[in-house]
Image (cartoon, grey):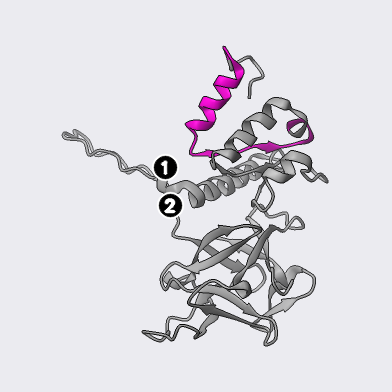
Amino acid sequence: MDIEGGVTGNINDAMAAGVEEAAVICPFMTPAYQASRSCKKELSYADTREVVVVPLMVTDNWEASEWLGLVTAGLLWVDFRNAEENEEQFDLCVRSLEEEIMFNVGHLLDTEEAPKEEVDQPEPAKPRLKAKPGRGFRHAHTKLYIQESSEQITEPAEDSRGSVELSETPGDHSYWEEIKVTGCKYYRNAVTGRYLGFDSSRDELHSEPRPSEAGEWLLLVDQTDQSHRRAVVIKNKQSGRFLAVRDGSFTGLASHNQDCRWYLE
């Protein structure tokens, strides 16, 4: 924040340098931010340079529009709307932001500390952030994870479908790499490399060897959740159905409710 004149000299040069040296940019989205010419320049420049943007929402009952809505369209924002309620809520918000940053650019920030040659007294190990292998999806109500079945064919046919199941515990097959494309995302299993797909005619979730229209997804913030646990809803773009769990099985719903709530882990 340049409240106290921290940006000196040519403001355009200073903003450009900041964008060019950043691994990630986190705009605090408010009506005032959207109305700022300098903020528009800075974030638009970041978008042009394809710098990773992780937005923070801090305003109730407001949605970004105009240039800000365009730049942040399809991005998963972190909920900071109730961050000032108490210290615990603030810590939860910061933890959510940290996890989202590490998911997006952890490979750029995760560094090993050089070992010390001489240590007089042992020091406790410092916790170090780890880049996540992919997104884990845990159903809010049943606490079950989306997991590709480990019992896959060793060399499946090109058009074969794999099984996707609900698991009580997260395993290696529970992580899905996010691949961003125009207007949607693909989710590729971090172990098998197969893509998450949905068959609306069978109301069935499956995995497939390559991306297709059935595997185009929209990941949206669930604004009704107040837990600050990165609650999302997952919408299949082709069918328009929201991924839910009912009676212990996957299903697609025409409109989302609590059965469609997932936590990112």
Q: CA distance from mark 1 to mark 2?
A: 8 Å
- Which residue has dot 1 on it? 109
Whether label 1 touches label 2, CB < 8 Å: yes
Disc 2 designates what residue?
A: 131
Q: Which mark is drawn over residue 196?
A: none
| Tag 1: amino acid | Leu
- Quarter assignment of residue 32: top right
Q: Residue furthest top?
A: 9
Crowd rating for badge 2 (residues with CA inside 10 Å; few <14, some 14–19, many 20+): some
Q: Secondary structure at mark 1?
A: helix
Q: What amino acid does circle 2 point to?
A: Ala
* Residue 164 drawn above or below residue 81: below
Residue 110 visible in image: yes
Which residue is painted at 75% across and 76% down in the image? 253
- Residue 19, given in percent of the width and then of the height, sits at 54, 31
Observer-nearest of 21 and 224: 21
Does residue 58 show up? no
Chain part drawn in magenta:
8-33
Residue at 36% across, 84% down: 154
**Residue 66 appears in which quarter of the rendering?**
top right
Q: Position of residue 192 (x, y in %)?
A: 42, 73
Q: Is residue 123 covered in magenta?
A: no
Residue positioned 42% across, 42% down in the render: 109
In reply to whether residue 13 is colored magenta, the answer given is yes
Expressed as whole percent of the image width and height from the top left, the position of residue 94 reads: 58, 43
Quadrant location, the C terminus: bottom right
Between residues 207 and 165, which one lies in front from this camera angle? 207
Left or right: 146 with respect to 55? Answer: left
What quarter of the picture does the N terminus occupy?
top right
Q: Residue drawn 41% across and 70% down? A: 191
